[in-house]
Amino acid sequence: KQEVTQIPAALSVPEGENLVLNCSFTDSAIYNLQWFRQDPGKGLTSLLLIQSSQREQTSGRLNASLDKSSGRSTLYIAASQPGDSATYLCAVTGGGNKLTFGTGTQLKVEL
Amino acid sequence: GAGVSQSPSNKVTEKGKDVELRCDPISGHTALYWYRQSLGQGLEFLIYFQGNSAPDKSGLPSDRFSAERTGGSVSTLTIQRTQQEDSAVYLCASSFYGKETQYFGPGTRLLVL
């Protein structure tokens, strides 16, 4: 059974700092990995999707990497802003196309 | 364009009652998913529809849960004889086809008293 773990569970940083969120998964047989953000009381917003054959994806200040063989992904956020405050979730797609989600990292960027 | 929509946004019901939750996927998306987000369990998969194929029901927690998708578009998740442990946020997502980016709706917050 696929298990996805995210470290740290919570993170508080000052505005402008670069930061890294970590995601690990136990079964490397995945089709892709997605990073989402969730704002309080809201649904999920997809940030980046990395196919299993890819090593990284970039969107603006976000960069996600994937090391499938070691079961790890990182989400790098450059020059963090208060608007980046949210819960960040990684999820992997395995057999059956369903997403298995990590436990999430709650990020707070302070002024 | 319109995203995934869900209704109702909030639902309060009494234990033992049946509830129906609705999901309207993005037009043209062939894949539709239901997930549940609860405090104790995080986000978990419930059911997946892909085109006209038989749905993947492997995540449904009990036979009180069922879902259908009519005409390859709108989906309804039904919970019969609700229990307090069913209280959660029920999220719907759709994608152009399986294994692609999933787009989520805002969710339905269900509270069973």
Image (cartoon, coloured by chain):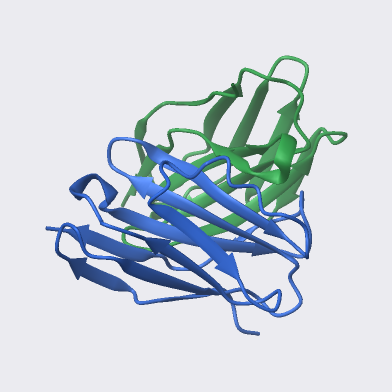
Chain colours: A green, B blue
Q: Position of residue A102 (x, y in %)?
A: 50, 33
Q: Position of residue A89 (x, y in %)?
A: 50, 42
Q: Quadrant of residue B15?
A: bottom left
Q: Position of residue A104 (x, y in %)?
A: 43, 37
Q: Is residue A75 left or right of residue B20?
A: right
Count of numbered marks? 0
Residue projecting furthest to the bottom: B1
Residue at screen point 33% across, 74% down:
B9
Residue projecting furthest to the top: A70
**Residue B40 or A77: which is nearer the viewer?**
B40
**Residue B21 or A45: which is nearer the viewer?**
B21
Q: Position of residue A110 (x, y in %)?
A: 31, 48
Q: Is residue A95 left or right of residue B57?
A: right
Relative vertical location of residue B25 with respect to residue A39 in this rendering, above or below: below
Q: Is residue B99 left or right of residue A102?
A: right
**Residue B97 or A68: which is nearer the viewer?**
B97
Relative vertical location of residue A12 with respect to residue B92 in this rendering, above or below: above
Q: Quadrant of residue B97?
A: bottom right
Residue at screen point 61% across, 23% down:
A25
Residue at screen point 25% across, 52% down:
B87
Relative vertical location of residue B13 with respect to residue A103 in this rendering, above or below: below
**Residue B18 or A88: which is nearer the viewer?**
B18
Q: Quadrant of the N terminus of chain A?
A: top right
Residue at screen point 65% across, 29% down:
A73
